[in-house]
Image: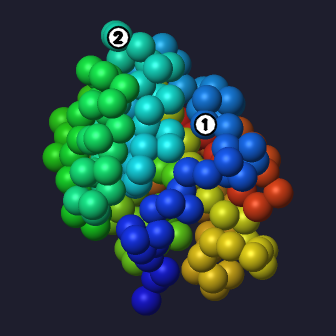
Amino acid sequence: MVHKFNPKNKHKLDNPERRKAMPPKETLERLMLLEGDKVADIGCGTGYFTIVASEIVGEKGEVYAIDTSLEMLDYLQDKIEANQLKNIELIKADEYGAKLKDNSLDFILISYVIHEIEDKDKFLENYLQKLKSGGKLAIIEWKKVETESGPPLKHRIGLEELSKLLTVHNIKLLKEIELSENHYGVIAQKG
């Protein structure tokens, strides 16, 4: 059984300590999100990256905020309304996918989700169908080391394991990024 984040702990997703360690705008820029991109924020949670992604992609871009939790999506909807953002669409997903057109996305962000998925191949296969050829996939995960917070060590996915998983799905790893003491990111591209 994989470790799942409890929506009741949503206050942990956006706090001053996290913003200092991983500033959302700087992080998304390092992950190569661009103005005009159509992006899916998979596992958007409270919108930590969603709100900033909306600013980065601008009026010509679109953000699909995707989560399996209605509680998270409702919370995010309030933030979207408070910020009067027009380029974000909320989508309720199931465990392995969301209703999006195939080959419609320029960028997919999967932040702290892969370690929660039982069948990682099925999950990636479903979402990668939504990514255009040449589109970018950015993944943020916990390093496979013991830390005070985060999922149990046995549920984390290390960089080597993630790289093998992407290779199986014909995704080319472009860049590995050290995001913080406890987190790493990868940028990959669909062929």
Instruction: Give the quarter of the image for residue 60.
Output: top left
Instruction: Give the quarter of the image for residue 29.
Output: top right
Location of residue 30 in the rendering, given as x and y in whole percent from the top left corner: 68, 30
Q: Amino acid at mark 1?
A: Pro
The one nearer the camera, 55 or 175, is 55
Q: Residue at x 52, y 70 (%)?
A: 115
Residue, far top: 60
The residue beneath circle 2 is 59
Number of marks in the image? 2
Gap in Å between the C-alphas at discs 1 and 2? 19 Å
The one nearer the camera, 161 or 50, is 50
The one nearer the camera, 35 or 51, is 51
The residue beneath circle 1 is 24
Q: Amino acid at mark 2?
A: Glu
Q: Secondary structure at mark 2?
A: loop
- Horizontal arrangement in the rendering, residue 136 relative to residue 61 (left or right): right
Q: Residue at x 50, y 60 (%)?
A: 11
Residue, far front: 82
